Amino acid sequence: MRNNASRLLLAGTGSGCGKTTVTIALLRALQRRGVSLAAFKCGPDYIDPMFHTEVLGVPSRNLDLFFVDETEVRGQLARHVPADGVGIIEGAMGFYDGVSGNTDTASAAHLAHATDTPAVLIVRPRGQSLSLAAEIKGFRDFAPNTLAGVILNGVSAGMYSYYRAIAERAGLPVLGFLPPVPEAEIPDRHLGLVTAAEIGDLSDKLDRLADAAETGLDLDGLLALASTAPPLADESAPLMPVVDKPVRIAVARDKAFCFYYADNFDVLHQLGAELVPFSPLDDEKLPEGIDGLYLGGGYPEEHVAQLAANLTMRDSIRDAVLSGLPTIAECGGFLYLHRTLDGAEMAGVIDSNAHLTKNLQPFGYVTLTARRDNLLCCAGEQIRAHEFHYAVSSDAGMDFDAKKPNGRAWACVHASDTLYAGFPHLYFRANPAFAENFVRRCAQKG
């Protein structure tokens, strides 16, 4: 499949420059114009895509060159950018920040180059005048890249002409500004922004941001730049069902469990799974007639009292998992399977305790290698994954080895013939065989 796929990547000078704010403001403003849109996030982030999805009403997808190769990310863009529309990709961290401190591998710059996507650098002037031009020029000249413009964020209308004249000295066109919009600020917490579902007036905030974007951003210039991106082809082989009839997999989806890749759901669907949403917070028990269970990450620590109070659900999940229901439990889902979380009783599948700390635990990309045959793979098989959590467990498991790109390694994950439970989050396209084995095992339940 070939797609003209007009597209832009919104890059940043670093975390905190306002990439997400500018991205959702632009998405809403273009949506108002009737532009067909698709949104993407560079890297393994879950929260930013929730905001993209809230704006567009269709899933935002992750493009990650640590998990998959360049052919696959080009294919994802070709598959999902509307033929007559525009794809907007939000970058991660700083433009050149890759899998470790001394490489740009899997960075926004790498993604833009691999997909021939024009990049626009979002800069927030802070205590700068002429140094702003030096900063932008440094990004432009540091390495070969696709940078083709600049957006000034957090700049008032009265100061825009001043900063624009300085920024243009770096040799990149300035494509507008986004002023401060205090009434549309999105609060954050320990894993980043609060989730979109937790903001009751989000639609109003999005509209206020879009108002600012329509006033300050050069929307015509951004669309024209997006149209310069060359066509893309989807050369990836489609996944096929691995079961004779659909298997029903219960998926925990509520405010406590909301960290999922849209592509993971796609993979499971393509392999022959029917996904059945339920809420460990509000439902009394697991759905009837299920063949598997998927407990994703999220914020169970923010809802421990309600999770603990739902005794019938805790009992339902504990009994099902201990009886051999094929189960994947990642990070927050893993915490829920513990005996206790921050002293509150949880499902009790994992006979250990977990608690939240004030410090980010070992985090980032890892390669997992199985120590034993298990639900998802055979001993010695590998998948690339990532961790991002503040919680610790008295028993994080010993059935996989995790190794970071810098060489640091540790044991993790509880795994058996019917269980994967651990802090690492999985991206199924990194090794679809893991998802295939899960779906096949669901078909063999009982």
Image (spheres, grey):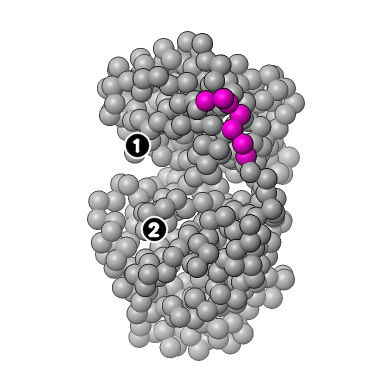
Q: Can residue 345 be seen in this view?
A: no
**Magenta residues, start to end:** 239-245
Task: Answer with left or right where residue 234 lies relative to residue 290.
Answer: right
Of the two numbered discs 2 and 1 in the rendering, the one whose residue sits closer to the viewer = 2
Question: How far across and how far down the image is residue 83, in percent?
Answer: 53, 64
Asked which secondary structure carries label 1, the reply is loop
**Residue type, numbered disc 2:** Leu
Question: How far across and how far down the image is residue 164, in percent?
Answer: 48, 85
Which residue, given by chain and number where applicable, does mark 2 sit on?
A: 56
Q: Is residue 322 magenta?
A: no
Against 27, is 437 above or below? above
* Residue 343 found in image quarter: top left
Residue ranking furthest to the front: 244
* Residue 78 found in image quarter: bottom right
Question: At 73% from the left edge and 40% from the top edge, which residue is drawn?
Answer: 407
Question: How far across and how far down the image is residue 136, in percent?
Answer: 59, 76
Task: Answer with left or right where residue 43 lies relative to residue 321.
Answer: right
Question: At 60% from the left edge and 76% from the top edge, which residue is drawn?
Answer: 228
Which residue, given by chain and number where applicable, does mark 1 sit on?
A: 254
Question: How far across and how far down the image is residue 37, in percent?
Answer: 45, 63
Q: Distance between the residues labelled 2 and 1?
A: 20 Å
> Which of 168 and 43 lies nearest the eye of the viewer?
43
Q: Main secondary structure of the magenta part?
A: loop
Q: Can residue 435 be seen in this view?
A: yes
Q: Is residue 242 magenta?
A: yes
Q: Which mark is residue 147?
A: none
Circle 2/circle 1 CB separation < 8 Å: no
Question: At 57% from the left edge and 66% from the top edge, which residue is drawn?
Answer: 5
